[in-house]
Image: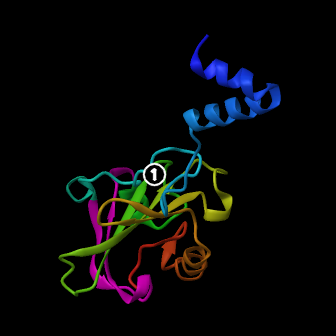
């Protein structure tokens, strides 16, 4: 008989069961909230929606400019290949396909050389997130840690009000305001 089994027998059935349950729970572990950007149902942090080399792979659709939103920072907008035509068209005739990604690097200075953080959205399948316009929204820091994942009300309110035609389409602000 093992030492652990002997201890369980000495503790009695109910105490032994409780000890066994706690040992099993401790060995399996449980989901943890490692802070912003962590999925509480997963053991690892969320990945950014965009690849690390997005600046080499994506097309810049808006050059450096002051944004009246995004904490009055300067921004650029880069888009994945599948988002180029819809972003340029601003029309329901050219919808964003699922998987299209837009990334907005944010800067403190007007020459947009050193980013402070990134905001990104990915188009989802129709009906996947109707409250968020069928987009997945993220805020990502310079270490590529997701600090916010979802469709924050402040983002939806602004994009709904300011990104309607003729200034944008499908919650994307494509035209210069």
> What stretch of residues is rendered in magenta?
59-82
In this view, 56 is above or below 8? below
Percent position of residue 27, x then y: 55, 33
In this view, 153 is above or below 31? below
Say left or right for 59 vs 161: left
Question: Residue 15, located in which quarter of the rendered image?
Answer: top right
Q: Can residue 94 be seen in this view?
A: no
Seen at 61% across and 79% down, the residue is 157
Per the image, the residue denoted by label 1 is: 46
Percent position of residue 176, x then y: 38, 83
Dividing the image into 4 quarters, which one contains the C terminus? bottom left
Q: Residue furthest front?
A: 10
Please state which of residues 71 and 59 is positioned toward the viewer in this rendering.
Answer: 71
Q: Find numbered disc 1 in the image and state the secondary structure of the residue it sits on.
A: loop
Say left or right for 137 vs 1: left
Dividing the image into 4 quarters, which one contains the N terminus? top right
Please state which of residues 61 and 71 is positioned toward the viewer in this rendering.
Answer: 71
Seen at 50% across and 48% down, the residue is 98
Q: Is residue 170 magenta?
A: no
Q: Residue furthest right?
A: 14
Say left or right for 54 vs 162: left
Question: Residue 110, located in which quarter of the rendered image?
Answer: bottom left
Percent position of residue 119, x then y: 41, 68
Seen at 60% across and 57% down, the residue is 134
Q: Which residue lies furthest to the top in this view?
A: 1
Q: Is residue 78 magenta?
A: yes
Seen at 38% across and 60% down, the residue is 145
Q: Can residue 166 be seen in this view?
A: yes
């Amino acid at each position: 008989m093992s030492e652990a089994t002997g201890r369980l027998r000495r503790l009695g059935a109910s105490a032994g069961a409780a000890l066994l349950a706690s040992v099993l729970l401790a060995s399996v572990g449980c989901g943890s909230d490692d802070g912003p950007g962590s999925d509480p149902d997963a053991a690892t942090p969320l990945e950014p929606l965009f690849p690390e080399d997005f600046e080499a792979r994506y097309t810049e659709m808006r050059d450096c400019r002051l944004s009246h939103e995004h904490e009055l920072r300067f921004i650029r907008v880069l888009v994945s290949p599948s988002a180029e035509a819809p972003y340029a068209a601003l029309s329901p005739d050219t919808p964003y396909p699922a998987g299209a990604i837009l990334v907005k690097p944010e800067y403190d200075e007007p020459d947009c050389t050193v980013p402070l953080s990134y905001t990104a959205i990915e188009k989802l399948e129709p009906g996947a997130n109707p409250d968020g316009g069928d987009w997945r929204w993220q805020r990502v820091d310079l270490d590529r840690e997701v600090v916010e994942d979802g469709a924050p009300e402040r983002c939806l309110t602004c994009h709904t009000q300011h990104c309607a035609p003729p200034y944008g389409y499908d919650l994307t602000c494509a035209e210069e305001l």
